[in-house]
Amino acid sequence: MKSVSRLTLIVAVLLYSIMVVSPAVAQDPQPTPAPVAPMPVQPAAVSTPVYPVLGNHTVQYNEWLYCIGRAYQVSPWAIAAHNGIRWPYAIYPGQVLAIPNVRWYNIPAGPTCTKQFEPPPVPTVTPAPTQTPPTCRAYYTVRWGDTLYAIAWRHQTTVWAIAQANQIWNVNLIYPGQVLCIP
């Protein structure tokens, strides 16, 4: 092995590694299969929620979704989705848009288009009647060592009734000198 120079040994190793790494060069070439046309991929159907339509708006010159949305207080994104309009949300004069019933709250300031129909009025929410405060049968001044449970027991009522009548959120926290309404 001494008679073989290091340079000869390195060249032999490199040639061997080239033959091992790329054996396809030394073998007979295989026939290449004919290219197969790729199957067209259909985009997945996007299901958009269906909302009742308030009416139809015919786009006029210089109108865009924001000003139409402001006119009817309807979300411009809902108008785009309902009519199948994608980014960049291009609309054209003469195009008829169905205006869905999707309210738009906190509408930013800006130009408003002319309404072409009057949407139905928004129903107003009637607040629930507030509970009348319970009438007090008696008033009790808390002494040192009293608990709400003992006071309720003494006055033949419940801890929760006293807590509610006095707006006490922690039934374990009452103070000496505090005046309680006993319902």
Image (tube, rainbow, N blue to C red):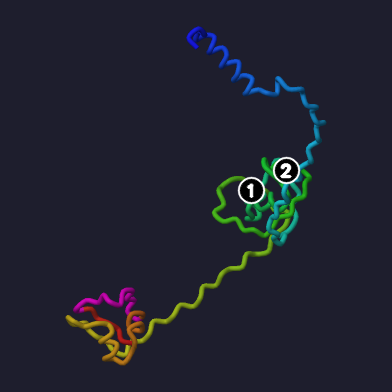
Q: Nearer the viewer, residue 70 or 115?
A: 70
Whether residue 40 sits left or right of residue 51 in the image: it is right
Q: Secondary structure at mark 2?
A: loop
Q: Secondary structure at mark 1?
A: loop
Whole-percent x, y for residue 154 in the image: 26, 91
- Residue 151 figure quarter: bottom left
The residue under label 1 is: 112
Q: Nearer the viewer, residue 32 or 90?
A: 32
Q: Nearer the viewer, residue 17 or 91?
A: 17
Position of 135 relative to 77 (above/below): below
Whole-percent x, y for residue 56 in the image: 75, 55
Q: How many marks?
A: 2
Question: Which residue is pictured at 18% across the width and 82% down the height?
Answer: 143
Whole-percent x, y for residue 30 in the image: 78, 26
Q: Nearer the viewer, residue 129 or 49?
A: 49
The residue under label 2 is: 91
User: How far apart are the two marked residues, 1 and 2, measured between alpha carbons?
Assistant: 16 Å
Q: Tag 2: residue type? A: Ile
- Residue 167 figure quarter: bottom left
Residue 74 is marked as: none
Whole-percent x, y for residue 8 in the image: 54, 9
Q: Label 2: how many residues lie within 10 Å, few (<14), some (14-19) or many (20+)?
A: some
